[in-house]
Amino acid sequence: SALDQIGSDQSLQEHWIKRFIAIIIDAILIYVIASIVFLFMPVPFWWGWGFGYSLMAGLLFFLYSGLMEMMSGATLGKMVLNLRVISLHGKLDVSGAVVRNISKIHGLILLIDWLVGFVTDGDPKQKFLDRVAGTTVIITDRLSDQQQHIYQSQQSDYAPPPPTQYTPHETQTYQQRGQQTAQPQQAQAPPPEQQRQKQPEGQICNDCGGRLILMGNGRLQCIRCGRIT
């Protein structure tokens, strides 16, 4: 769990500090907007600034977070801290955005969401509802240029083309050409399909061919499809 690792893992500490600052920025923005709206609402003072204000602010926070993450992958607070929300199953959809943000309806529920994710087993960079929704948060300024390109492709409807598939005849032709041009002391080059199979599993995802990045718990995650190995 995150509780077991955060004392010795600086990247995990940075991750949660950034998320905490981001949610404070978003909360200030939402509660300022809610306060302005309530100033012009004809409701009793005790109701408006008690139950009514809390309800409106929570609903605004939930809708704002869900819509921003579906459209751009991040709220304004996350953008400032270079954080992005991604789905572990492809592009973030409505159900994923709703489930991971429903706890923002009330501050106490959000705190419980964080604490449960913090003390239970699983990816230490996920709150509890992130695990339920199949989502996680990444720090984008730590990605390489190629990883940034793959991430941006994932956020759009574009997907990189799949690896080229060769027919048996094409494979045999490439083998014959390799035999003719290879030096006597060099071994015959394997066909492209065997080369792809020998690529190190720790660098390339076996499911989609995307790059794997190291997470705080020492496991690898594909930044294209989100698969954790």
Image (cartoon, rainbow, N blue to C red):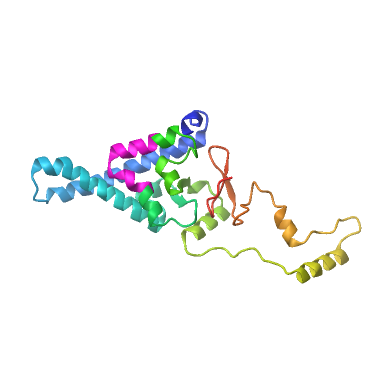
- The answer to which of 77 and 117 lies nearer the viewer is 117
The secondary structure that dominates the magenta segment is helix
Residue 227 lies left or right of residue 54; in this view the side is right
Magenta range is 100-115
Task: Say which quarter of the image contains residue 215.
Answer: top right
| Left or right: 176, with 151 as reference point | right
In the image, 21 versus 99, the foreground residue is 99
- Residue 127, quarter of the rendered image: top left
Left or right for 204, reference 168: left
Q: Is 170 rendered above or below residue 152?
A: below
Residue at x 46%, y 52% (from the top left corner): 87
**Residue 205 in the image, given as x and y percentages of width and height:** 61, 52
Count of marks, rendered view: 0
Vertical placement of 166 versus 56: above or below?
below
Q: In percent of the image, x 15 and y 40: which residue is there?
A: 50
* Residue occupying the point 29% across, 39% down: 107
For the point 54% across and 37% down, which residue is it? 217
